[in-house]
Image (spheres, rainbow, N blue to C red):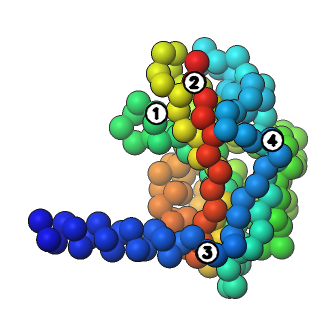
Amino acid sequence: MKKLYRVLLIAIVLQAALVAEGFKLESSDISEQLSVDQVYRGYGCHGNNISPELRWSGEPRGTKSFAVTLYDPDAPTGKGWWHWIVFNIPASVHELPRGAGDPKRGKLPRGAVQSITDFGTIGFGGACPPKGDRPHRYIFTVYALDVDHLSLDPNTSPAKIGSVIGKHALAKASLMARYGR
């Protein structure tokens, strides 16, 4: 039992180390409740599927690139649901404009890569919890990475990309919103 507590304590300390003092993520599009703009269009959901404007600041020294994710830990899959992953965002970039998650709109910075989501498509996939579930948590996270470039294919599984991002993360900052239907 003591060993389990030690492992949990180490995990908590390592997680806390990733939260850099002053590193923050903000958005004028996100409040406590996601809007119809950030809701998926499909799977029985009738939203606009528009990624929100995101901006960040205060990353730690040594940051060479950024990654942004949107994750729903409450999805009834046993492993959550990846709604959006963007990586290889240059260290000089500190924002993504509204709608950047649509690959057809070309709003990502040069070199940034959007990968496949758990919807099976590349780009932003908004909230779409099952009807009747309690409101799900949608966590937008920006990661400050210690590498310029992640050599990953856009069709790499979201879980693998998340793992690689975690291995290179110097710090992270998150925003959370809820949505239910």
Mark nearest the camera among 2 and 1 is 2
Q: Nearer the viewer, residue 3 or 103?
A: 3
Mark nearest the camera among 1 and 4 is 4
- In the image, is 156 to the left or to the right of 105? left
* Three-letter residue code for mark 4: Asp
> Which of the marked residues, 2 or 4, is nearer the chain's N terminus?
4
Mark 1 and mark 3: Cα distance apart in space: 28 Å
Mark 3 and mark 2: Cα distance apart in space: 31 Å
Q: Quadrant of residue 46?
A: top right
Q: Which residue is mark 1?
A: 75
- Residue drawn at x 43%, y 74% is 14
Image x and y of residue 109, in percent: 84, 59
* Three-letter residue code for mark 3: Ala
Compared with 62, 127 (above or below) is above
Mark 2 and mark 4: Cα distance apart in space: 18 Å
- Residue drawn at x 61%, y 74% is 20
Q: Report the disc number at residue 29.
A: 4
Q: Which residue is mark 3?
A: 20
Q: Secondary structure at mark 1?
A: loop
CB-based contact (under 8 Å), mark 2 and mark 1 = no
- Residue drawn at x 53%, y 57% is 161
> Which of the marked residues, 3 or 2, is nearer the chain's N terminus?
3
> Which of the marked residues, 2 or 1, is nearer the chain's N terminus?
1
Image x and y of residue 180, in percent: 57, 24
User: Residue at the left extreme?
Assistant: 1
- In the image, is 95 to the left or to the right of 137? right
* Three-letter residue code for mark 1: Ala
* Three-letter residue code for mark 2: Gly
Q: Report the disc number at residue 180.
A: 2
Mark 1 and mark 4: Cα distance apart in space: 23 Å
